[in-house]
Amino acid sequence: MTEVWQNQIRRALLALAPIALALGFTGGILVLAGAPPLLTYEKLIMGSLGTAVKRADVLVIWVSLATCAAGLLVTFTAGQWNIGVEGQIVLGAIFATWAGRVLLEQPGAVAIPAMVGWGLVGGAFWGLLVGLLKIYGRVHEIFGGLGLNFVATALNIYLIFGPWKQRTGGTLSGTTIFPESLWLPTLPGLRLSILSIVIALVIVSAVSLSLRGTVWGLQLKAVGQNIRSAYILGLPTQRLMLSAFIVCGACAGLVGAYLVVGVHHRLVPSISSGYGFLSILIVLLSGFRALWTAPIALFFAAVNIGSTALQLDLQLDASLGGVLQSAIVLAVVLMQGVRERYLDARARPS
């Protein structure tokens, strides 16, 4: 066997190893839980792709995950860990709900774009706060983002049980549902809006092109690689970092507005549904490549929907889907480290 073929086989094994490792890990957990692994994986697939309604629900979640992941790529490129994306989703939802309440009597052609626009503003504002705390307050973006997540959640709960509560009183079901004229148009019998898919695809493509083919993207990469060198070279590092937080916050705010206008049709307590944190895993799994985030987000969305079937058909906890997602991410990160050590060892002169 030639050396070329041996290298190809080694690369293929390294690429497949994370999947095998994750399946082995989750398979062990399933055996301990008393569930047959193969049947569980079959239920997971059929639970997400078995019917038109399930496939549509997968795409509904995909829109949120792909949009959030695209925004996070911008901050990660600038070397910033924007853990506050959950709070930015919530602020986008709050701003969109506020606009909907103000424009309640207006036609959908006026109210819906306004709600989406204010959602963008809300998320961008919350993202900007993280950047300002980082630059001028010397607060690390992880702690600033987490702190603002708590503030956003508390504000959301306060509004639902306080000023925006239903006439019958505050309830966990959320605020009063908007009239249908303020709902995003969907396909008959499904929750899926074609417009939301188009917007998500446009955002993913725009972020990919911006990071790869614009001066702004190149400058963000320079800041992310070495901020001190970028500053010495004359780049406006603070302004670039703030722009990254604003763009990411706007993407998250758009997701918040979408969840209000297109999914729940009102503000609910857990409106972010963990999509922000899940998007961080997607970006890590993609290796910070924009075009890879879309198919990976689709896989994560399918696991989310399919895991509900585990609870219904096999009496397994739906959180096993989250275990599978996390195991895959950990396995990929682990194997990336192994691959780098292997390549370094081969490149080193003997």
Image: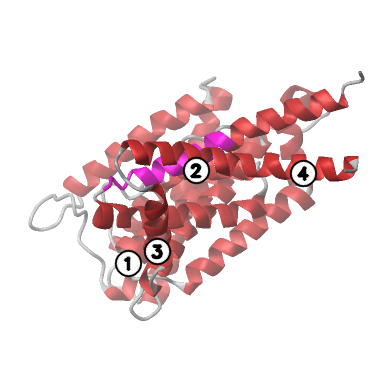
Q: Amino acid at mark 4?
A: Ile
Let me know if residue 236 appears in the view: no
N-terminal label among 3 and 1? 3
Task: Determine whether 142 is above or below 201 in the image.
Answer: above
Mark 3 = which residue?
46
N-terminal label among 2 and 3? 2
What is the magenta range? 316-331
Q: Does residue 176 appear left or right of residue 256 in this picture? A: left
Q: Amino acid at mark 1?
A: Leu
Task: Determine whether 172 is above or below 230 in the image.
Answer: below
Question: Between marks 2 and 3, how big is the CA–CA gap?
Answer: 18 Å
Task: Determine whether 114 is above or below 293 in the image.
Answer: below
Mark 4 = which residue?
9
Mark 2 = which residue?
23
Q: Secondary structure at mark 3?
A: helix
Residue 10, position as x, y percentages in the image: 76, 39
Question: Between marks 3 and 4, how big is the CA–CA gap?
Answer: 32 Å
Task: Determine whether 206 is above or below 287 in the image.
Answer: below
N-terminal label among 2 and 4? 4
N-terminal label among 1 and 4? 4
Decide whether residue 71 is among the magenta residues.
no
Write down the quadrant of residue 104 in the picture: bottom left
